[in-house]
C-alpha cells in the first residue's frame, strides 16, 4: 500500500493500482475537508445557508 | 413520542406501532447475527463450501446486491453529470438503496473471508495482479462515496438541521456532490466490470471464459452495463414496495417513467449484446476449448437450458420490451412486472456466473458437484435483507427521503388526530430548538 511496505515494487502494476486508489481517496478526502472547513467558517459567520 | 424528529409536512404512524411492525424483521436480524458469530468463532466449517465451491451463496449474494445497488451510481450519473434534474426526486432513495447494498456486500465479505481481523491485508499487502484487489479497492472507496452521499440526508433530519454547522455541512456537500458522483461512477465502472472480469478470465473453465479487448474479457463490460441497466429497476421496485407498505404515493409517475425508460433502453441494448455474446461463446469460444454448448445444460439435476431462457428471455427481453414502450412503463402493473422480472434476470445472471461456473465439470472424470447452502449461510445472507428493511424504515420515518411526499400527501388539518399530531410536533420542535444568542 505504501512505498515503505517490504513488498512494494516501483512497477506499472503498483503505480496503476495504487495510483487509482490514492487518486480516489484524495478526491474524497479533499472534498470532505473543503465541506467541513467551509461549514465551520459559515457557521462561525452565522450565515443563513440556502435550501437544497 | 418522536414527533420532533419526523420531517415537516408528513404524517407517520405512532412509534409503538412502528416498532411492533419491525419485530419480525428484528428476529431475522438476530438469527443472522447469531449465524455470523458462529462463522467467525467456529470458522468456515459452518458453511457447505468445499473444494468445488470456493465461491458459494455469499459471493452470489455479494455480486447480486452490487449489481442491484448499481441504481445509485447510475441514477447519480444521470442526475449530477448528465443533468436529468427530474431524478432529484428519487436520487435520495437510490442512494439509500445503494448504501444498503454496498454495506451489505462488505458485511458478507467480512464473514466470507473467515478472518475479518485480517481484512485490511488486502489493502496493506495488495496483490496488484488480481482483479479482486481492484474490486476490493473500488468497493471500499465507493462505499465511502455512498456514505458521503447519504450523510446530507441524515443531516437534513429536522433536529440535526437546526445545528448551524450541520446545516452548512449538508448544504456544502450538496454543492460538491457532482464531484463525488463522478468519482462514484468511475469507481463503479471498474468494480462492476472487474467482478465480471473475474469469471471471464477463467481460461480453464470454458463455461465462463470469454474473449475481449486487451486484458478485459467481454464479461467485464457486460457486468457494468447490466448493473447500470438493472440497478434502477431495483430502486423502482423497492420504491413501489415502500409505497404499498406506507399506503402513500411517494414519487410522481413522471419520475418513475423517466428512470424506467432509461433503464429499459439500457436493458434492451445490454440484452442484445448479451445474446450476441452468448451466441459467439456457444458456437466459437466454448467449442474451441473442447466443450459443446449443451454439455453445460445437461446430465445434471438442476442446470437445464431453462436457466439460460430465464436469464435472457424472461429476465431480459420481456422486461426490456415492457420498459421501452410508453404504455408498458406507464401502466403500474406492467411496470411492476417488468422491474420484478429484471431483478430476477440479473440475479440469475450472477448465480450462473458464480455457481454454475463451479458446477460444470471440466475434466472427463468429473461429475456435476451440487451445492446446498447451510442454514448459517442462509441466515447470514438474510441478515443484510433484515438490516436493509430496518434502515429503509428508519430513514423513511426520520429523514426527508422522498421530496415529493408532502406535496403528494397533503395533511388534512381538519382531522382532529392529525391536527394534534402536528401541534405536538410543532411544540416538540420548539422545545428542542437550540438556544438563541
Image (spheres, helix red, strand yellow):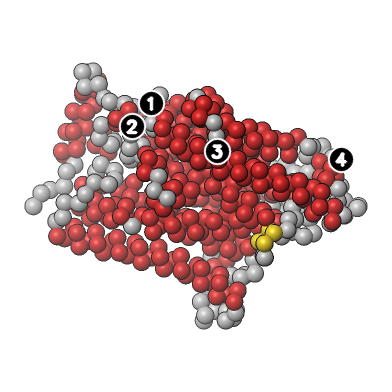
Circle 2/circle 1 CB separation < 8 Å: yes
User: Sequence-wise, which precedes: disc 3 or disc 2?
Assistant: 3
Q: What chain letter is assigned to the residue under label 4?
A: B
Quickly name the residue at label 3.
B264
Quickly name the residue at label 1.
B248
User: Sequence-wise, which precedes: disc 4 or disc 1?
Assistant: 1
Give the mark toward the camera: 4 or 3: 3
User: Sequence-wise, which precedes: disc 4 or disc 3?
Assistant: 3
Q: What chain letter is assigned to the residue under label 1?
A: B
Q: Find numbered disc 4 in the image and state the secondary structure of the residue it sits on.
A: loop
Quickly name the residue at label 2.
B405
Q: Find numbered disc 2 in the image and state the secondary structure of the residue it sits on.
A: helix
Circle 3/circle 2 CB separation < 8 Å: no
Report the residue at 51% width, 76% height from top: A2
- Residue B49 location in percent, x, y? 72, 50
User: Sequence-wise, which precedes: disc 3 or disc 1?
Assistant: 1
Identify whether B185 is placed above or below B336.
below
Report the residue at 33% width, 37% height from top: B403
Within 10 angstroms of label 3, few (less than 14), some, or many (20 or more) residues? many
Spatial CA distance of label 4 from label 3 is 36 Å
Left or right side of B158 for B46: right
- Residue A48 location in percent, x, y? 16, 51
Circle 3/circle 1 CB separation < 8 Å: no
Spatial CA distance of label 3 from label 2 is 26 Å
Q: Find numbered disc 1 in the image and state the secondary structure of the residue it sits on.
A: loop
Which corner quadrant of the image does residue B324 belong to? top right
Which corner quadrant of the image does residue B112 belong to? bottom right
Amino acid at each position: 500500500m505504501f512505498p515503505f511496505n517490504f513488498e512494494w515494487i516501483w512497477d506499472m502494476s503498483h503505480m496503476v493500482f495504487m495510483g487509482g486508489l490514492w487518486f480516489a481517496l484524495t478526491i474524497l478526502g479533499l472534498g470532505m475537508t473543503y465541506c467541513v472547513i467551509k461549514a465551520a467558517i459559515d457557521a462561525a459567520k452565522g450565515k443563513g445557508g440556502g435550501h437544497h | 413520542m418522536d414527533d420532533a424528529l419526523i420531517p415537516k409536512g408528513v404524517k407517520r404512524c405512532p412509534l409503538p406501532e412502528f416498532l411492533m411492525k419491525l419485530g419480525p424483521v428484528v428476529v431475522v436480524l438476530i438469527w443472522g447475527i447469531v449465524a455470523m458469530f458462529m462463522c467467525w468463532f467456529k470458522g468456515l466449517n459452518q458453511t457447505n463450501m468445499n473444494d468445488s465451491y470456493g465461491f458459494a451463496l455469499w459471493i452470489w449474494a455479494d455480486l447480486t446486491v452490487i449489481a442491484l445497488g448499481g441504481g445509485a451510481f447510475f441514477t447519480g450519473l444521470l442526475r449530477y453529470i448528465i443533468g436529468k434534474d427530474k431524478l432529484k426526486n428519487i436520487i435520495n432513495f437510490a442512494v439509500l438503496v445503494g448504501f444498503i447494498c454496498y454495506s451489505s456486500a462488505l458485511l458478507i465479505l467480512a464473514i466470507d473471508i473467515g478472518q475479518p481481523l485480517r481484512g485490511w491485508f488486502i489493502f496493506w499487502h495488495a496483490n496488484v495482479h488480481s482483479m479482486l484487489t481492484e474490486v476490493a479497492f473500488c468497493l471500499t472507496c465507493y462505499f465511502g462515496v455512498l456514505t458521503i452521499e447519504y450523510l446530507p440526508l441524515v443531516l437534513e433530519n429536522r433536529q440535526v438541521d437546526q445545528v448551524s454547522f450541520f446545516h452548512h455541512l449538508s448544504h456544502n456537500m450538496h454543492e460538491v456532490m457532482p464531484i463525488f458522483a463522478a468519482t462514484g461512477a468511475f469507481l463503479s465502472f471498474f468494480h462492476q466490470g472487474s467482478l465480471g472480469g473475474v469469471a471471464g478470465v477463467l481460461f480453464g473453465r470454458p463455461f465462463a471464459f470469454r474473449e475481449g479487448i486487451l486484458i478485459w474479457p467481454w464479461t467485464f463490460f457486460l457486468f457494468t452495463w447490466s448493473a447500470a441497466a438493472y440497478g434502477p429497476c431495483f430502486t423502482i421496485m423497492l420504491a413501489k414496495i415502500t409505497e404499498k407498505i406506507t399506503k402513500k404515493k411517494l414519487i410522481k409517475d413522471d419520475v418513475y417513467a423517466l428512470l424506467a425508460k432509461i433503464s429499459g433502453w439500457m436493458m434492451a441494448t445490454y440484452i442484445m449484446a448479451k445474446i450476441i455474446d452468448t451466441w459467439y461463446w456457444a458456437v466459437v469460444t466454448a467449442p474451441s476449448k473442447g466443450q459443446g454448448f449443451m454439455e453445460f445444460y445437461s446430465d445434471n439435476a438442476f442446470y437445464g437450458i431453462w436457466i439460460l431462457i430465464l436469464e435472457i428471455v424472461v429476465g431480459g427481453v420481456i422486461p426490456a420490451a415492457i420498459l421501452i414502450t410508453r404504455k408498458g412503463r406507464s401502466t403500474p402493473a406492467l411496470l411492476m412486472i417488468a422491474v420484478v422480472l429484471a431483478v430476477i434476470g440479473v440475479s440469475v445472471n450472477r448465480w450462473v456466473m458464480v455457481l454454475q461456473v463451479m458446477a460444470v465439470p471440466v475434466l472427463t472424470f468429473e461429475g456435476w458437484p451440487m451445492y446446498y447452502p447451510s442454514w448459517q449461510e442462509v441466515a447470514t445472507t438474510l441478515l443484510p435483507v433484515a438490516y436493509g428493511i430496518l434502515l429503509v424504515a428508519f430513514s423513511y420515518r426520520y429523514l426527508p427521503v422522498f421530496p415529493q411526499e408532502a406535496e403528494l400527501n397533503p395533511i388534512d388539518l381538519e382531522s382532529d388526530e392529525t391536527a394534534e399530531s402536528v401541534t405536538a410536533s410543532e411544540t416538540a420542535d420548539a422545545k428542542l430548538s437550540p438556544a438563541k444568542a
